[in-house]
Image (cartoon, helix red, strand yellow):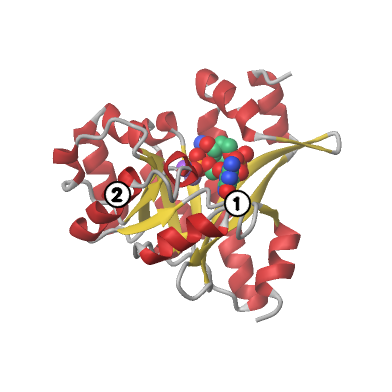
């Protein structure tokens, strides 16, 4: 049962895991970064975040779960550096309620310090909708994160209701084109084109998510999208497979 109590037990018994999905340079095929995605390892089965993140958000337990994700990402960055001399940025998803919580910014700063993480290696992914809940507060929090050096990506871009007039005031570094606009490529390209243009004008990097085939990749490449993520490259991988595939060969 995906109840608050069972999620609390899952935290207590260390049943959450991070999987890692690589992000690639579309032109060169080189790995540039990765996104950490939570899974629940329960009785030998892997439970998708789709079936517990909504409950976690409703009950507020998303706050300690989200903190666990950030700490685990910091530990991982440290481990990759110390054990493999491997340096790769990790992005974490921050839920709306977690972003609204007053402890988020101090927690992130404290964890980065504790694990001796270069803040540029930790990227925060926040959905467009979370940012627009309280725009003034969002700007001030993002400013604090940005001045501390963390990367900030707007996730699922194009599906929320961001006001274009505010977008230029948001201290963000990246926009992620929601996969629903990538799915439609190359036939329906108006929104993807517009987001890429916006990214260029605002001097933001743009990631296309949910790339599933060569036709989509070709369109993105010819339209100067620099960074891509999706099943066509790789699905999210458990830590050991990610290390085997992307770290050990170096
Ligand atoms: O990885 P997957 O496709 O199963 O993810 C499904 C959804 O769960 C996505 O919207 C993703 O952003 C979200 N998700 C995955 N990991 C986390 C996490 O650590 N925190 C939050 N808040 N959402 C996550
Ligand atoms: O909401 P968010 O963008 O964080 O969701 C990320 C999730 O999207 C990943 O955890 C992953 O499971 C899923 N995803 C990643 N690439 C693809 C893809 O190419 N196709 C589909 N359908 N889902 C993807
Ligand atoms: Mn994401
Ligand atoms: Na997304």
Where residue 171 sits: x, y (%)? 24, 51
Look at 46% across and 43% down and name the residue there: 184
Q: Position of residue 121 (x, y in %)?
A: 45, 64
Cα separation, mark 2 vs mark 1, equals 32 Å
Can see residue 90?
A: no
- Give the residue at mark 1: 72
108 to the left or right of 61? left
Quarter of the image with the N terminus in it: top right
> Circle 2: is it few (<14), some (14-19), or many (20+) Cα within 10 Å?
many
Residue 62 location (% of width, % of height): 53, 30
Residue 195: mark: 2
Mark 1 closeness class: few <14, some 14–19, many ≥20 residues within 10 Å: some
Q: Residue at x 37, y 34 (%)?
A: 159
What SS does tag 1 mark?
helix
Residue at point 71%, 23% (across, down): 6
Residue 108 numbered tag: none
Q: Give whichever of 89, 166 is nearer the camera.
A: 166
132 w.r.t. 225: above or below = above
In what element is the residue under mark 2? Answer: helix
Residue 159 is left or right of residue 61, and the answer is left
- 238 displayed left or right of 20: right
Residue nearest the viewer, comparing 14 with 126: 126
Q: Nearer the viewer, mark 2 or mark 1?
A: 2
Q: Is residue 31 visible?
A: yes
Q: Quadrant of ligand 1?
A: top right
What is the quadrant of residue 94 in the picture? top left
Question: Residue at 25% across / 34% down in the picture?
Answer: 162
Mark 2 or 1 closer to N-term? 1
Furthest residue toward bottom = 250
**Vertical placement of residue 56 versus 149, above or below:** above
């Amino acid at each position: 049962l995906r109840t608050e109590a069972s999620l609390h037990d899952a935290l207590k018994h260390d049943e959450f895991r991070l999987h890692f999905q690589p992000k690639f340079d579309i032109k060169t095929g080189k790995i540039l970064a990765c996104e950490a995605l939570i899974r629940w390892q329960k009785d030998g089965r892997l439970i998708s975040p789709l079936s517990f993140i909504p409950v976690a958000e409703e009950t507020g337990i998303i706050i300690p779960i989200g903190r666990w994700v950030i700490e685990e990402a910091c530990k991982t960055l440290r481990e990759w550096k110390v054990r493999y001399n491997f340096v790769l940025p990790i992005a974490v998803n921050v839920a709306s309620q977690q972003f609204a919580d007053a402890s988020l910014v101090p927690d992130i700063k404290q964890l980065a310090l504790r694990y001796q993480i270069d803040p540029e290696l930790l990227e925060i992914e926040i959905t467009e909708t979370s940012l627009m809940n309280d725009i003034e507060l969002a700007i001030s929090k993002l400013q604090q994160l940005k001045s501390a050096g963390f990367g900030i990506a707007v996730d699922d871009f194009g599906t929320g209701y961001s006001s274009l007039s505010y977008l230029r005031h948001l201290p963000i570094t990246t926009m992620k084109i929601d996969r629903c606009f990538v799915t439609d490529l190359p036939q329906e390209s108006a929104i993807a084109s517009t987001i890429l243009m916006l990214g260029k004008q605002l001097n933001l990097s743009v990631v296309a998510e949910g790339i599933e085939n060569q036709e989509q990749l070709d369109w993105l490449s010819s339209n100067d999208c620099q960074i891509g993520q999706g099943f066509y490259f790789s699905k999210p991988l458990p830590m050991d497979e990610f290390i085997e595939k992307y770290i050990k060969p170096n």
